[in-house]
Structures are given as C-alpha cells and as structure tokens.
Amino acid sequence: MKPVDRTHGPTQTIGTPDLLSFPCEFPIKIMGPAVADFADVISAVVRTHCPDFDPATLVQRPSRAGNYLGLTATIQAISREHLDTLYRALSSHPMVRVVL
C-alpha cells in the first residue's frame, strides 16, 4: 500500500498524478448553520482566496428541517495548492460544519 501524502488531501497518494487540469472551475460545497449572515461570511472567505468569485453565483439550499444551510461556491481553481488552501480556510472557520 502506498503511503498517503497529507499535503494533497486525504485521498491523494504519493506518485499519483492529479486528476484535475488547472485552471478549472471547481464546485466547493459548504454546510453550516442557517443564520442570516452565513452566506455573506462564507463569500468573504472564498473571495479572500478567489478575488474573482462572484457572491451572486453562490447556490444556497436549506436543510429539510431548516437548521442548516448548504452552499455551493464554484471557483476558478488555479492549482491543487490553491484548492487545498481554500479548503483549509473554510474547514477551520467556526461557522462551517462540513466542506466537500
């Protein structure tokens, strides 16, 4: 079994080529509480790493019970490192429960 390279995400193994071709459009799904400013806060985090991101394109979906809000931000990813940095920023935000 090949060792896992933690610098490229949990499923990337050493010596395995990236399956994405950069630059590319990449959807990132974020789940958090259904509070009034969640989408605005997440848009600000995304824009920090992707200045060309248009918050008007953020897709919002409330959970069935209305307790959570699912967001999809489609960004222009320029490299694997770019995606990893954005993923870490979103994952470490206190309002975010899940990032896919």
Image: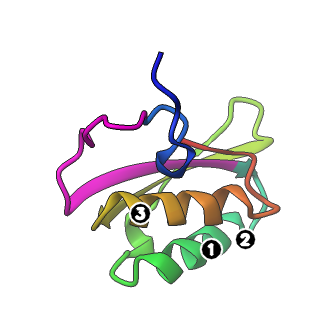
Residue 26, given in percent of the width and then of the height, sits at 32, 52
Could you tell which of marks 3 and 2 lies nearer the N-terminus?
2
Q: Are marks 3 and 1 in contact (CB under 8 Å)?
A: no
Could you tell which of marks 3 and 1 lies nearer the N-terminus?
1
Q: Are marks 1 and 2 in contact (CB under 8 Å)?
A: yes
Residue 15, given in percent of the width and then of the height, sits at 32, 37
Q: Dot 2, crowdedness within 10 Å: few (<14), some or many (≥20)?
A: few
| Badge number at residue 40 | 1
State the residue position of label 3: 81
Q: Amino acid at mark 2?
A: Asp
| Badge number at residue 37 | 2
Please state the extent of the stretch shown in magenta in the rendering: 13-31
Image vertical order of residue 36 relative to residue 10, above or below: below
Residue 91, given in percent of the width and then of the height, sits at 68, 55
Q: Quadrant of residue 66?
A: top right
Closer to the camera, 7 or 97? 7
Residue 88, given in percent of the width and then of the height, sits at 62, 60
Q: Is residue 87 magenta?
A: no
Give the secondary structure at mark 2. loop
Q: Is residue 30 magenta?
A: yes
Q: Amino acid at mark 1?
A: Asp
Q: Dot 3, crowdedness within 10 Å: few (<14), some or many (≥20)?
A: few
- The residues bearing labels 3 and 2 have C-alpha atoms spaced at a distance of 28 Å
Give the secondary structure at mark 3. helix
